[in-house]
Amino acid sequence: MPKIILYLFIGICSNVLLGQKYNVEQVVGDLNQFDYQLVYNQLDSIITNGIKNEAFPGAQVLVAKNDSIIFHEVFGYHTYDSIQPVALDDLYDLASVTKITGPLPAIMKLVDEGKLDLDVPFSTYWKPWKRRKDKKDITLREILAHQAGLEPYIVFLNKTLKKNGRFKNRFLRKLKSKRFDKHAFENIYVKSRFNRKMYRMINRSKVSEDKTYRYSGLTFLVFPKIITDLTGVPYEEYVQENFYEPIGAKTLGFLPSTKNYRNHIVPTEMDTLYRNTLTQGWVHDENASLLGGISGNAGLFGTAKDLAKIMQLYLNYGAFEGKQILPKDVVQEFIRVQYPENDNRRGLGFDKPLLNNKELPLEEAYPAPQVSPDSFGHSGFTGTFVWADPKNQLVYIFLSNRVYPTREHRALYELNIRSAVQQVFYKGLANQLKL
């Protein structure tokens, strides 16, 4: 059976459409718009080269066009010992992709409801900043566009470990108790109020006087608290009920090891500092871990298909299966470049192409040079990447575990693999796209 027909059969059996009723003719038409085997061969070459150069032990690629998955393939294994092959329904640690799939839809909804305002001081909602001269006037718009001058990252783990690497007993324990109820890892529990220490350190962190683009994930650690306070519903329940359930994204969620998923969970790093074992099924990011695995900066896990659903929701400006889940005008505002005059490409929460992206060769572009300026997405530290292009009706998902066995593996970036793979589809569909 030819590969393209076999794939179509698999797709029909697993419901390949995203956000609309199933239509066989549409799927066949989309599959015939490019040479599937040629595209597969080109991707196989790029990704196999990545595996050989230890960019990652395995990866998977999903592309949807016009609400239909037209390509979903896996490559390699979970680890370099080639024991567990990558599967289409594997769960991945999404790392910073959490930022646009966790707190961001909640923030959009709260902006629409008037409970959050992009252009009033963030200290209106985060009261400790009212007493901080360098932070009291920073707006939510500046924060989400990474235009606020905040510090990029704080290593909170340093506060929990002794010089010899052992736990400080007042912050980390191996047994659960009333005072240590945040489950960070299999036998690691964090002090229930450690989040307050994290918030204090964020509140006291420095702010750059130079208001230019500077990526920071600090406020994504406090967004869940704000979302919970404004809605009266715990953050993880709020996003589950309002976004993941309505679009049928059953695997998107936190703490997968505590749930009864049949899916395999792809491992991340062989941690030698904190967990002292392979990290699998628990969030890789240490800051999210110290919040009990539920955070706004990282911690979300999911499959490629469920990621495609939420990106399709954004691509359709908040609509899914005929229902407006997020307000169209708010989504359009969030995916718009906010500060181009400051050479800042960012939207609100979303990453955007380089401002001169189309003029650049592939090795200098971000992401692929042929994506439209309207497109948007985000990357993740563990090797994940999601991108949506409304102009061309394309969703692109790339999942890998590039931090296995160590985060020092940087060939994913050096070989520019995610952009190179994305560019293959733009070339393969060139006669169908508005390039």
Image (cartoon, rainbow, N blue to C red):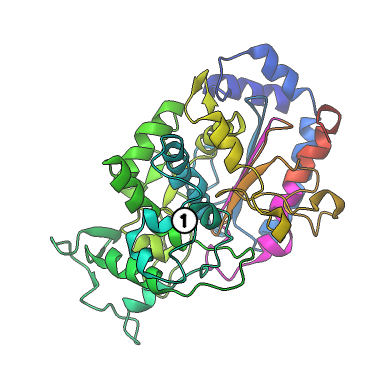
Position of residue 259 in the picture relative to residue 394 (left or right): left
Task: Return the residue nearer the eye: 434 or 47.
Answer: 434
Question: Mark 1 packing: few (<14 Cα in 10 Å), some, or many (20+)?
Answer: many
Q: Position of residue 108 (x, y in %)?
A: 48, 40
Residue 396 included in the magenta stretch of the image: yes
Disc 1 is placed on an element classified as loop
Q: Is residue 163 left or right of residue 45?
A: left
The C terminus sits in image quarter: top right
The answer to which of 160 and 60 lies nearer the viewer is: 160
Tell me if residue 91 can be seen: no
> In the displayed structure, would residue 166 be above or below residue 36?
below
Question: Residue 283: x percent and y percent?
Answer: 41, 57
Q: Is residue 368 visible?
A: yes
Expressed as whole percent of the image width and height from the top left, the position of residue 415 reads 74, 61
State the count of labels: 1
Return the x and y of residue 368 as percentages of the image width and height.
Answer: 76, 48
Q: Residue at x 49, y 61 (%)?
A: 138
Q: Residue at x 72, y 65 (%)?
A: 414
* 35 magenta-colored: no
Quadrant in the rendering for residue 370: top right
Position of residue 169 in the picture relative to residue 245 (left or right): left
Q: Give the residue type that dot 1 points to.
A: Pro
Q: Residue shown at 82%/54% (left/top)?
A: 362
Q: Quadrant of the N terminus?
A: top right
Seen in the picture, residue 239 relative to 51 is either above or below; the reply is: above
Q: Residue 286 appears in which quarter of the rendering?
A: bottom left
Magenta residues? 393-421
Kindly give the residue lying farthest to the bottom in the view shown.
Answer: 163
Nearer-the-camera pick, 230 or 191: 230
Q: Which residue is mark 1?
A: 267
